[in-house]
């Protein structure tokens, strides 16, 4: 049950977010299938890593509020069918020159971290893919990481 999984994954983050005055919201589309064919432990870990990274970078404040905000959104597209989970923050954003290396961890590449490369591997192993969009402009800031997974 994706609703239960998201709530469980973000339970620890809720207290940390409150400590840093960060607004952490979970938005789940009503039409989301009740059961999703995924490894629950691995997907929970993925959501925790993505939300944890967002919390680490947004907690210094944003243009919208003192501590910033993070939204974790789950939607379902019945036409495909696929489920999307998006972690969006309104922090400083990721510089464009670092985006190509965000999900990699190898020689001759800037070190970003092992966590995101493992996230990509877990999503890929589930037959999904992951995309990132980030803005660093003074008026439009923040990062959105969206993973999509087959729903059937």
Image (cartoon, helix red, strand yellow):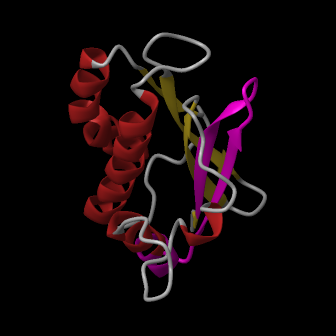
Instruction: Tell me: residue 39, above or below residue 62.
Output: below
Q: Is residue 15 magenta?
A: no
The vertical placement of 86 against 7, above or below, is below
Position of the C terminus, as image quadrant, is bottom right
* Quarter of the figure with residue 91: top right
Q: Residue at x 52, y 30 (%)?
A: 71
Q: For the magenta stretch, what is the residue range?
A: 121-148
x then y, percent, for residue 76 = 64, 48
Residue displayed at 64% across by 51% down: 95
Q: Residue at x 29, y 16 (%)?
A: 18
Q: Is residue 141 left or right of residue 42?
A: right
Q: Is residue 95 visible?
A: yes
**Where residue 7 appears, x then y in whole percent?**
32, 35
Q: Is residue 138 magenta?
A: yes
**In the image, 98: left or right of 48?**
right
* Of 145 and 134, the residue lying toward us: 134
Number of marks in the rendered image: 0
Residue nearest the viewer, comparing 72 with 89: 89
Image position, residue 96 (x, y; %): 69, 56
**Residue 62 position by quadrant:** top right
User: Residue 124 at what x, y percent from top left?
Assistant: 51, 77
- Say which residue appears at 30% left-offset and 64% top-offset: 42
């Amino acid at each position: 049950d994706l609703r239960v999984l998201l709530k469980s994954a973000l339970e620890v983050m809720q207290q940390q977010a409150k400590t840093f005055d960060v607004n952490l919201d979970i938005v789940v589309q009503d039409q989301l299938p009740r059961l999703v064919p995924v490894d629950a432990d691995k997907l929970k870990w993925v959501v925790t890593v993505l939300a944890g990274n967002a919390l680490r970078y947004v907690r210094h404040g944003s243009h919208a509020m003192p501590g910033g905000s993070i939204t974790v959104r789950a939607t379902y597209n019945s036409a495909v069918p696929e489920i999307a989970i998006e972690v969006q923050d309104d922090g400083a954003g990721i510089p464009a020159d670092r985006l190509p290396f965000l999900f990699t961890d190898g020689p001759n590449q800037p070190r970003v971290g092992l966590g995101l490369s493992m996230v990509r591997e877990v999503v890929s192993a589930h037959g999904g893919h992951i995309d990132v969009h980030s803005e660093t402009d003074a008026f439009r800031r923040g990062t959105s990481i969206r993973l999509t997974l087959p729903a059937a």
